[in-house]
Amino acid sequence: MQVTTILVNDVPKVVIRPNDRKDLARFLRNGRSYLTGDAPDAELSHRPADEAEAARWRSAYQLHLAWGGSEEWFFGVPL
């Protein structure tokens, strides 16, 4: 899948690259408390990352690879 931005009440919160839609759904379900923090009723949505968000994801991914991390174990970065 492409790099995706997760929004909380239409505010970008994190940029991720899920493997498939099932991965995305699992992240939204399991990460809800992390993503919404003090606003448990907040609305979660997602969209393709814009260029600046994708660049931030790529930068974090390169750092992950530099220390010897593998592609399959890198998921995303907070914005």
Image (tube, helix red, strand yellow):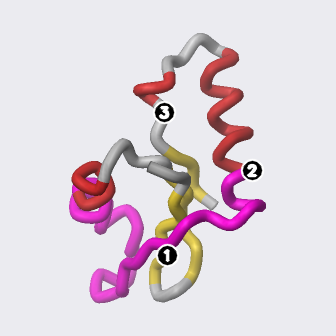
Q: Residue at x 44, y 72 (%)?
A: 46
Q: Position of residue 72 (x, y in %)?
A: 42, 26
> The residue under label 3 is which amino acid type?
Phe
The image position of residue 38, as x and y in percent, is 39, 79
Q: Nearer the viewer, residue 17 or 27?
A: 17
What distance separates the C-alpha of mark 1 from that of mark 3?
A: 20 Å
Query: Dot 2: what SS?
Result: helix
* Label ID, residue 74: 3
Residue type, mark 2 in image: Ala
Q: Residue sitting at 61 percent across and 64 percent down?
A: 49
Outermost residue to the top? 68
The residue under label 2 is 55
| Marks 1 & 3, CB-CB < 8 Å contact | no
20 shown above or below 44: above
Q: Is residue 32 magenta?
A: yes
Question: At label 1, which amino acid type do we have?
Answer: Leu
Could you say which is closer to the camera, residue 47 or residue 29?
47
Disc nearer the start of the sequence (1/2) = 1
Inspect the magenta stretch and tell me whether residue 56 lies in it.
no
Please, is residue 66 above or below residue 79 in the view? above
